[in-house]
Image: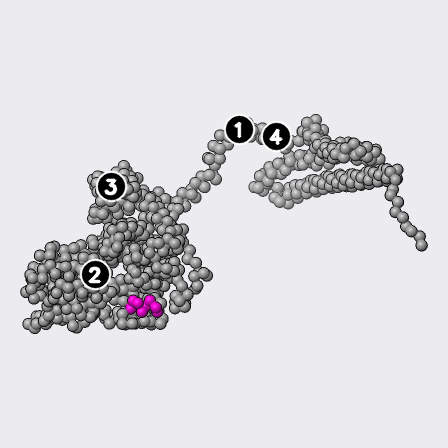
Amino acid sequence: MVKETLIPPSSTSMATGTATSSSLSMTLSSTNALSFLSKGWREVWDSADADLQLMRDRANSVKNLASTFDREIENFLNNSARSAFPVGSPSASSFSSEIGIMKKLQPKISEFRRVYSAPEISRKVMERWGPARAKLGMDLSAIKKAIVSEMELDERQGVLEMGRLRRRRNSDRVRFTEFFAEAERDGEGNFGDWEPIRSLKTRFKEFEKRSSLEILSGFKNSEFVEKLKTSFKSIYKETDEAKDVPPLDVPELLACLVRQSEPFLDQIGVRKDMCDRIVESLCKCKSQHLWRLPSAQASDLIENDNHGVDLDMRIASVLQSTGHHYDGGFWTDFVKPETSENKRHVAIVTTASLPWMTGTAVNPLFRAAYLAKSAKQSVTLVVPWLCESDQELVYPNNLTFSSPEEQESYIRKWLEERIGFKADFKISFYPGKFSKERRSIFPAGDTSQFISSKDADIAILEEPEHLNWYHHGKRWTDKFNHVVGIVHTNYLEYIKREKNGALQAFFVNHVNNWVTRAYCDKVLRLSGATQDLPKSVVCNVHGVNPKFLMIGGKIAEERSRGEQAFSKGAYFLGKMVWAKGYRELIDLMAKHKSELGSFNLDVYGNGEDAVEVQRAAKKHDLNLNFLKGRDHADDALHKYKVFINPSISDVLCTATAEALAMGKFVVCADHPSNEFFRSFPNCLTYKTSEDFVSKVKEAMTKEPLPLTPEQMYNLSWEAATQRFMEYSDLDKILSDGDGGRRMRKSRSVPSFNQMVDGGLAFTHYVLTGNDFLRLCTGATPRTKDYDKQHCKDLNLVPPHVHKPIFGW
């Protein structure tokens, strides 16, 4: 068995191996470099051959074309001279002149052919290119030795050598190009003597001498420019109306500045009425000179005394005449739906629904019915849908509904029994939740998303402050073309009666201003008892149920026949809560108990404070008979002669209007909420508690006057709808929808107020998106979005799938 031993290599053998490997790597590097250079030179050689062959081919082609052209010219001239025109014909002289021109041109063409095909060109090319071709065949072995020696010193020298070779190749190309330049300068090959070349050079020299001003002036006066001007003038034609509108002068600009600065002036103590007086004085100063508006607008200016509207229309007309178009600012979104049909769409959104017998449930229902009677607009009533657990807390007599269709059927039946005609409008539902603490229904989620985009034209928000306190969704004025808010409730008066009421009322006052300004274009207040809100006017846009007018007419007929119409004395009707006038009633009755003597008052109502109210009346031993609440149209209430309503918390008491419609006396406080009723002779108002006693005695001893037809009309929903159309500007908006020319102030006049309103809406959207802030400010839990039960009842997409998108 032989052992195999591993012996370490000696130092000599290691040195030898190292030298061998070094020599081998050097040889491989040299071989790779030579192969690379050989490949590069082969490519250069092939490229040069291809270029030379291409030049030869092109020269031969031009030579053949010149010969062919020369022959064709000769044949054409000979044939034309013999057969085109007979000798002595009228056209022979003109044609002979053309033949003369062609004969003069023929020597030039022949000369061009001869010069271009001259052998001197080929010889010159070969002489210039010859050295380059000779250099292409250099000794590659010498290059190999040089490269190997250079690589031992520095491998980067190979890169430098390649750069040198590239420059040499480029120099050959330059020499070839210089040949033609030298040929032209020296006159070789007759290039410099060719007449077309000399003519072209002369033209270029003349062009260079001409200044740019001369060139532009010649272009301006050209026929092409004149035609272009004419075409542009035909595209844009200034209208006669634009020519008739003069620019704004100093009083108008100052009035506009004051109007736009109202928010700033309000912060420094200048009230809105003062700003309006300043604008009015400036407009009167201007009206002495009469705005030179188109005839239609001028007549409106003379007839109208609304200087604010006139100023807006004046500015809009000036901007429209200049072609200015404003598409909104940072906060606003003017991409609003355009109605494709002739009929406009009105959506009425409210905070309550039948069978809850409250003003915000009944009055919007009547408004929808009477608006739908007109053929100008289609109407949708949007009411809250409560889950069954909330229905049990809100609706009377344990009445509940299992589906929206069932509740809609109940609402329509109740309405048709009272108005006497079939109302053609749509009823839609949005998710809502009932708050026990606030005794109100609040929307769950974005209410605006339950009105389709095609129907988003005009919105009427019943109680806009209530709807928007916690609104977290698309801005109403961005989705709708016009938004009207109707204020039903004096929330500040209710809040002041609660614990820390003054502090709460302070904050609610500013929040109401905030949300109504951000989300409404116009606000209607039913009476002066409500908070003074931005963009608001006072107007009673409510009517009474036609059934009460029928009852009043029946009583008037009985009285005309000499029958006794009223067999009972006085009564009070209202929800039994302290804020509905029960506190004032008990205080008045207790203070003047002796003066009133045997006066008895029947009280109808149910409510949360019923036990406390009855205990207080019993404590003072008052002549009050408490009865179960009834509908005001109930037969049991027809025979009462006097309705007493001491409440000062109502905005516009519906029961007072209904009592007047039935021909009764009404005794009420001298308060802004009763301003509309003062014009009726049967309305007796009192200012002091002593005056209350005298008015009660007067009503009990006299007979009420029958209502005139005009008074009955003023109480009706037809008159209320007419007032609503006028004060909400809907009559103008709906008339604009007939295809007439529309001048949108919002798009013509960039307004600082609109930018401020948009900023307020954006801030409100951000704050209401925080659940912690919502709860801290009293929002009902889980009202930022609707819940699973709402999804089931209304067939909605779950909130985690459908997320409301804000419209900024």
Q: Residue at x 87, y 42 (%)?
A: 9
Q: Earlier in the sequence, mark 2 or mark 3?
A: 3
Q: Which residue is mark 1?
A: 210
Task: Determine which of the numbered discs, if any, sits on residue 578 in the image.
Answer: 2
Q: Which residue is mark 3?
A: 270
Q: Which residue is mark 4?
A: 201
Secondary structure type for disc 2: helix
Q: Quadrant of residue 135?
A: top right
C-alpha gap between disc 3 and disc 4: 80 Å
Of labels 2 and 3, the one closer to you: 2
C-alpha gap between disc 4 and disc 2: 108 Å
Is 98 situated left or right of 687 in this image?
right
Q: Amino acid at mark 3?
A: Val
Decide whether the magenta segment is chiefly helix, strand or loop.
Answer: helix
Query: Crowding near pointer 4: few (<14 within 10 Å), some, many (20+)?
Result: few
Is 284 situated left or right of 165 in this image?
left
Query: Crowding near pointer 1: few (<14 within 10 Å), some, many (20+)?
Result: few
Residue 695, percent across and down?
Answer: 9, 60
Q: Is residue 432 within the magenta segment? A: no
What stretch of residues is rendered in magenta? 388-395
> Residue 532, can we see it?
yes
Q: Earlier in the sequence, mark 4 or mark 1?
A: 4
Q: Residue at x 35, y 48 (%)?
A: 760
